[in-house]
Image (cartoon, rainbow, N blue to C red):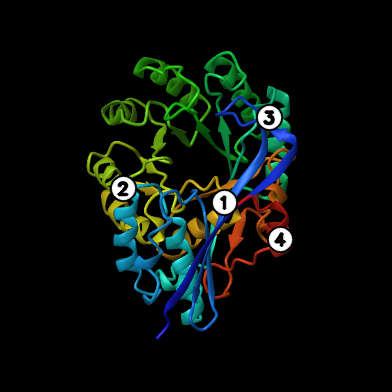
Amino acid sequence: MSRIVSIEITHHRLPLDPPFKASWDGRPRRHFDATIVRVKDDEGREGIGSGDLMKGFEGHEDLFIGQDPRHLERHYEVLSHINFHYGRCWPLDLALWDLSGKINGEPVWRMLGGRSDKVRLYASSGVLRDPQAMADQAERYVEEGFPAMKVRFSSSAGGRSSWRDDIKALGAIRARVGDRLELMVDCNQGWRMPWDTTLPWTFKDALAVAKELERLDIYWMEEPLFRSDRKGMRALKEATSVRIAGGEMTRELSEFRDIIEERAFDVIQPDVALVGGITGCRRLVYQAREAGVTFTPHSWTNGIGVLANAHLTAGVGDAPFLEYPYDNPEWSGARRDYPMASPLKHSHGWLELGDAPGLGIVLEEDRLASTRIA
């Protein structure tokens, strides 16, 4: 029987030159941090996870050492208690799934149910560009075979003066690509960076935007109101034909349970690297399906997080699309996936997961050594 013998957590920092100016931040990002979690068993196998910083995990290693890594439900319960008292330590759940797959000789998507070995992607942009530059980027996504693109509106500090300017950029994209791309919009109203105290949209602001998005045939409208305004989200959902999406930074599975039961969103977007891990989010897939709510994860971390969300989506979910952070040149695959031996590669808008045991992660050890900060 396999036993956990060690858990190692390291932190890494990749300098970004030129910097990445995210639409939800406004301050240029001059580095990209990644946390790597490694779990080893007594036969020398290693599981890998990544995501949040694992704050508060130190001192709890003894709760896992000596345990069978395949006792995933037990480990989930312990991590849920740590999550309550400390930080979001769900990358360990990803590492345990990766290790369990290696022990069983199976890819995680097959262990989860085996519905598919691939997922359909939408290209998730992150940079605010002028309308014609946004249209150019959309054209490139079409040429690469993506079926859909997410356009981000600016936060209060993001760079455009109002949502009307965001609509102009969106209109330029639609005029250029026609119906060759499904278009989603992230309104960036659900949460703020710690230093940004600007209020989010009111319900009537969001409704006015929704009417414009209806005109442009937008697939979904993400985070149009503050994250706790479930009543407002439901009212907006009922007032527009555009799907309402959200939940990317929701911290508790119980909040998603309430969102699903109240039919507050059309689309929920948990991220296994940030809430519940694969073990917890698997529960949400079934709850959402039975309620007629679409499950499609957020995945703006790094390639390890993308892979973990992809395995859940392929194995047990039935999502129309999975988020694929990709906005060259500022947010290239090489930057996003620097902990890995090679960046993820899509094939005509699909991510194929293959038969490699676990999550299929191969780390670039030399790069991790050179970027290590702790």
**In the figure, 368 relative to 47: above or below?**
above
Report the number of numbered marks. Answer: 4
Tag 1–tag 4 contact (CB < 8 Å): no
The location of residue 313, given as percent across then percent down, is 45, 58
Amino acid beneath label 4:
Ser
Q: Quadrant of the N terminus?
A: bottom left
Q: What residue does disc 2 label?
A: 85
Q: Is residue 281 visible in this depiction of the protein?
A: yes
326 or 336: nearer the viewer: 336
Look at label 3 and name its amino acid.
Answer: Met
Q: Residue at x 71, y 38 (%)?
A: 330
In space, the residues marked 1 and 4 are separated at their CA atoms by: 19 Å
Q: Is residue 78 left or right of residue 316?
A: left
Determine whether the residue tagged by mark 1 lies in a helix, strand or loop: strand
Residue under pointer 3: 134
For this orientation, the residue located farthest to the right is 17
Q: Nearer the viewer, mark 2 or mark 4?
A: 2
> Label 2 to label 4, Cα distance in Å?
36 Å
Q: Secondary structure at mark 4?
A: loop
- Ranked by sequence position, the earlier of labels 1 and 2 is 2
As helix, strand or loop, the secondary structure at mark 3 comes to helix
Q: Residue at x 41, y 16 (%)?
A: 205
Label 2, label 3: how far apart the Cα atoms are: 43 Å
Residue at (49%, 63%) from the top-left corner? 311
Q: Badge 1 is on which residue?
A: 121
